[in-house]
Image (cartoon, grey):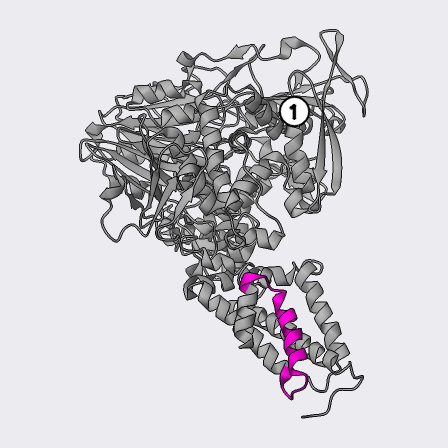
Amino acid sequence: MRFVPPALSGLVLLALLWLGFFGAGPVPPVGLVLDPWRGVWAAAASADLPPQPLAAIPGLMDTVRVVYDDRAVPHIFARSETDAYRALGYVVARDRLFQLEMQTRASAGTLSEVLGRPVLEADRMQRALGLAWSAEREWAAVDTASAVARAARAYADGVNAWIDHLTPRDVPLEYHLLRSRPQRWKPQYTLYLMKRMGYTLAFSTEERQRDRLAAMIGDSAVSALFPVHAPIQEPIQPGPGPYPRYDVRRLPPPSQPPPSVALHRLPPLEVASGEAGEDAVGSNNWAVSPRRSATGHALLAGDPHLDLTLPSIWYEVHLSAGEGLDVYGVTIPGVPSVVIGFNRDIAWSFTNTGSDVLDLYAETLNHRTHPTAYRLDGSWRPLDLRIERYLGTRGEVLAVDTIYHTHRGPVSFAGSQPTSMRWLVLEAGSTQALLQAQKAHSVDQWLRAMESFRTPAQNGVVADRSGTIAIRSTGAFPLRPGDGRGDRLRDGTTSRSDWTGYWPLTRYPFSRNPSQGYLVSANQEPKDPRVDPGYLGSDWPPPWRAIRINQLLAADSQVTVDAMRRLQTDPGSARADAVVPLLIQIGRAAEAAGTGGAADTAALRQALDLLAQWDRRYTRDDAGAVLFEFTVQELQNRLWDELLAHSPMALRRVATPGDAVLLEALRDSLTPWWDDRRTAGAVEGRDDVVAASLTAALARARQALGDPAKWRWDRVQHANIYHLLQLPSLSALDLPVQGGPSTISPSSGNGRHGPSWRMVVELGPEVKGFGIYPGGQSGNPASARYLDRLPRWLSGQLDTLRFPRSADEFPAGQTPARLTLTGTGER
Amino acid sequence: MLAVLIAAGTMNLGWWCVPVLGVLYGAARGTGEDLALEAGVGAALGWAGVLGWSAPPGPLWQLAVRAGGVFGLPGWAFIATTLLFAGLLAATAAHLGSGARRGFPLRPHPPG
């Protein structure tokens, strides 16, 4: 330095100070970030829970004891429910503050305030849907003395008690990276999250896709390729059987579209599937009667398949209070109740019903860009307006939107035809039911509590200590005029298009103590249409997981907890069992006919031999699964060329028919769908296409993975668990998993979805629970509790869940931390 | 001594104490062959002390790896960058402080 003029040092210092305070471009303020006391490094100091702290929460009536077990699960012992919810808000905020805020912002469409312009379009979409708008409206209408209002306010007290006492050293790492600070929590944010659940599980605009497809291949072909009722029946509500039942039909040929359907009316291509698996988001649950379990007690299993994120969507907790609340399970940060779990008498879990609760209506407006009214029953009705203002990270206004509403809901201007949307999620709440259900002491009480659950409709399986098991698809199922279907655009100019009511409870898919001794749901069509042809939804996912679970449960009359656990990661595939024999049969015929040249025949023979040797199990080291999946992809690409459309980026498939339809096509060598319309002058047949797909899959696998001896399923398919900010270093990526498309533990597409919580419960004299989720309780990446459960989740293990009756029941050494919460006056 | 002061200043006031203390150190020392180096090393040691004192090594390393990855740095490099930042701040500030005391000579000061 002695050879450096001081002025130069001054310049360097100035630059460092500038970088330190303001950053440069994508570089955040370096001083604020690297500060070893208040910057990102502070996250290391709060990585472990302090052993014996005291904290105060305004409004707390009595002292609440929180004991963390060796799995970092807080056991909250309070004297009243509201105190338990205050404590829950506090401990969740302590572990998951950034997640709480991000989830809320995602629902509210205010992500741009922390992430800037790149997420503006996502915010606009959310606000156009009106999730936050409807949550605010619902909150304004909630009785302030109701259980929902009291729970939400108590929860908010707890979250804000943590936020209000945050020191700079407690602020989660992500806030430092984003130059942001936590916002206070409002009670209605609980409703925001319930709306978000609705968005995740019950937002499907198949009308648009259907219209686009009808314009391409005609309405009857669309109805065959995307049928209302599942062509393979394995219903949730056991029916006349036998199941599975294949309702195979002949596919009608693609036809010219009707003149009324014009492509220009349709919005730009929104969805192009074929990349993500059909059941990428789905779930399983099942229950076993005492007479089929080894111990003579009812058993229940559940594993919701959702976005895999870090931190996890779930947070494990035990809530114990007076007033009948003593429940263990997983909650969603922001929701003041256990969503899936068990108490001293019952256990329950959900899968998504997938019912259609969203309809689109073609509206006639009085002006294309600045309408004030819409046509209804021959007169003009005024539109309601909602102004949405989007802010950037510095509080600057990024955009302003006007959202128009008819009496049905928000209006979309995508395409040349304005459409309004009626969506049950914007109208109904379900928090009350969850609060009540967790306190039920029998199957019947639980079913009664869930009667008020409206949306997103769920297949709730429940079992109790008396040995009763039951399942019911619960939610509001709209009744529509005419044919009752909701998968087509309806005329918005008449109120005769509107919903006429809802299914009565007695019509809900339901079963209690069936003679078969077990109940299963895996997102399949809940009721056999031969029992009730009423419209609940359309294009149901093939019931492969349900078929497999049913097969395995039917084969085991002495089911154990461990058998339930193994079943949750079973690598077998009912889909492969159905499709592979057909592929081999067709392929052998093509081989015998000498399709293609000698080289092709040799390749075809090798592919068929490999498939024939395959045990149809998606274990990590499996080779056959690689070839099969590549073959199915090649087959779909060749078979469904009629469904290709130009998107802004490329020629993509608008939608991919389900495997059940693929099976129908494979069984029909004469269907014109086998012909590739892109090859002018040639007419391809089924055997040609299957043979070409097999040889192409073999070549592709060889190119990607080398010699077949080196093929492994885990070189092709991984689970990817991304941090909420999509930052790879805070994520767990390229995780080898057992399971593939349509296995009970599914893994497909980009690997971002999967079993988000696996639980098995035995309903004996003392209820015993076992569970795991990928990730850990803490949202702090420096914490050992951030990812500690991942290895056991990957290997299919379950942890024993501790369910003590009092804080003093914990053995010494199994309580790494305790927390005492008092009211503000007592501190 | 400077390391302790910088550690205490950072913990009580903020990272910006480093250049302030560096300037003061340079101004107080006036001249010295390794004045800037001493200040830089002192600051780095001060921050290393804060890091070591404030958190156990396990979470600290975990954080270095994960937060470093956000900036495309391996864990060790993120730690090094942190200490280097403190060191550079203190060194340049001390040099500036020393120059101020000597009336900002246009040429570098002679050895000794």
The quarter holding residue A485 reads: top right
Furthest residue in direction top, as rendered: A378
Front one among A156 and A770 = A156
Front one among A328 and A210 = A328
Q: Position of residue B96 (x, y in %)?
A: 71, 77
Q: State whether residue A464 is above or below residue A788.
A: above
Q: Position of residue A726 (x, y in %)?
A: 57, 50
Chain letter, disc 1 residue: A
Helix, strand, or loop for circle 1? loop
| Residue A280 visible to an observer of this rendering | no
At 62% from the left edge and 86% from the top edge, which residue is drawn? B34
| Residue A464 visible to an observer of this rendering | yes
> Which quadrant, please, contains the C terminus of chain A?
top left
Per the rendered image, the range of residues in magenta is B11-35
The quarter holding residue A764 reads: top left
Q: Residues within 10 Å of mark 1 (few under 14, many from 20)?
A: many
In the picture provided, is A282 more to the left or to the right than B5?
left
Q: State whether residue A738 is above or below residue B53.
A: above
In the picture provided, is A202 more to the left or to the right than A494?
left
**Which residue, given by chain and number where applicable, does mark 1 sit on?**
A218
At 66% from the left edge and 38% from the top edge, which residue is drawn? A123
Front one among B18 and A182 = B18
User: Is B22 covered by the magenta stretch?
Assistant: yes
Q: Magenta stretch mostly in which secondary structure?
A: helix
In the picture provided, is A663 more to the left or to the right than B20?
left
> Which quadrant, please, contains the N terminus of chain A?
bottom right
At 40% from the left edge and 21% from the top edge, which residue is drawn? A450
Amino acid found under the numbered disc labelled 1: Gly
Q: Position of residue A103 (x, y in %)?
A: 55, 39
Q: Position of residue A783 (x, y in %)?
A: 43, 56
User: Is A17 covered by the magenta stretch?
Assistant: no
